[in-house]
Each structure stands twice: as C-alpha cells, then as structure tokens.
Amino acid sequence: MARQVGHSLGVATVDSTSTDAEVQAAYDDNASYLEDGSVAKCTAFITASTILLRRMFRRASHGGDDLEREIRLIREELGSARQWLTANAGVADSGAGIKHVDMRDLRT
C-alpha cells in the first residue's frame, strides 16, 4: 500500500520513517503554501524542511559548498514559513487567507 506524502487531517504524513525522496516530495509539493494561502501546506512544508535539515546535517560533515548553500537556503525558507504561519495560523484554510475587519461600529 502506498504511503500518502503531504498533509492530511492535521497530521503530518512525513516522519522519521519517510524516505529521502518522500520528504523531498513533501517539501516541493508544499512549497506553494504562500501562493495558495494554505496553513496546512505551510505546516507540512515546515515539517518536511525540518526533516531535510536534520538529515543534511548528517551529510554536511563530508563538506561541500553546494550542500552548505542548500542548508542555508532551507533554513531561510523554514524561517519565512514559521513567520508566515505565526501571522496566518488563525486564518481558516480557505486558500486565499483573506481577513475581513468588522467596521460597523467605527465612528468617525
């Protein structure tokens, strides 16, 4: 039976038992969280990024500028995703992530 990769019912489906290919696919598939305005995709992206980084650090001892650049890029993207999630976690996962302000009682 094939495993589902991504995010479903609030439970991350990539974890320590996921293959590198599955984690990479979850990272790629959920990288559009900002464009989609999706809190679920953002949390899945954060999970995949965290797993990728941890696994990369194991290989980083062998060196390589390309690996160091990739680690730095994922760290930056992870930081941005966490900031976006903090700002948008209360927004329903409607796709657009638009907030509406009630101004009925506003007095000028």
Image (cartoon, helix red, strand yellow):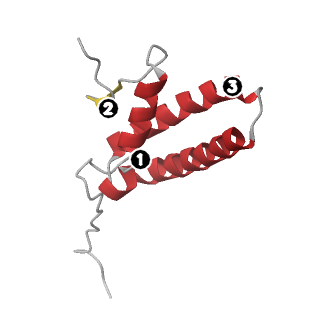
Q: In the rendered structure, which amino acid carries the disc numbered 3?
A: Arg
Name the disc covering residue 31, or none. 1
- Identify the image quadrant of the C terminus: bottom left
Task: Out of 26 and 92, give the one closest to the viewer.
Answer: 26
- Identify the image quadrant of the N terminus: top left
Q: Give how far apart the Cα atoms at labels 2 and 1 are.
A: 12 Å
Residue at mark 3:
59
Label 1 SS? loop
Residue at mark 2:
7
Residue at x 69%, y 22% (from the top left corner)? 58
Q: Give how far apart the Cα atoms at labels 3 and 1 are.
A: 23 Å
Q: In the rendered structure, which amino acid carries the disc numbered 2?
A: His
Q: Nearer the viewer, mark 3 or mark 2?
A: 3
Residue at x 60%, y 25% (from the top left corner)? 55
N-terminal of the two: label 2 or label 1?
2
Task: Report the side of 2 relative to 26 (left or right).
Answer: left
Q: Residues within 10 Å of mark 1 (few under 14, many from 20)?
A: many
Query: How many tags in the picture?
Result: 3
Q: Quadrant of residue 44?
A: top left
Tell me where residue 22 appears, x and y as whole percent.
Answer: 40, 26
Tell me where residue 91 appears, x and y as whole percent.
Answer: 32, 51
Q: In the rendered structure, which amino acid carries the disc numbered 1?
A: Ala
Residue at x 49%, y 48% (from the top left corner)? 81
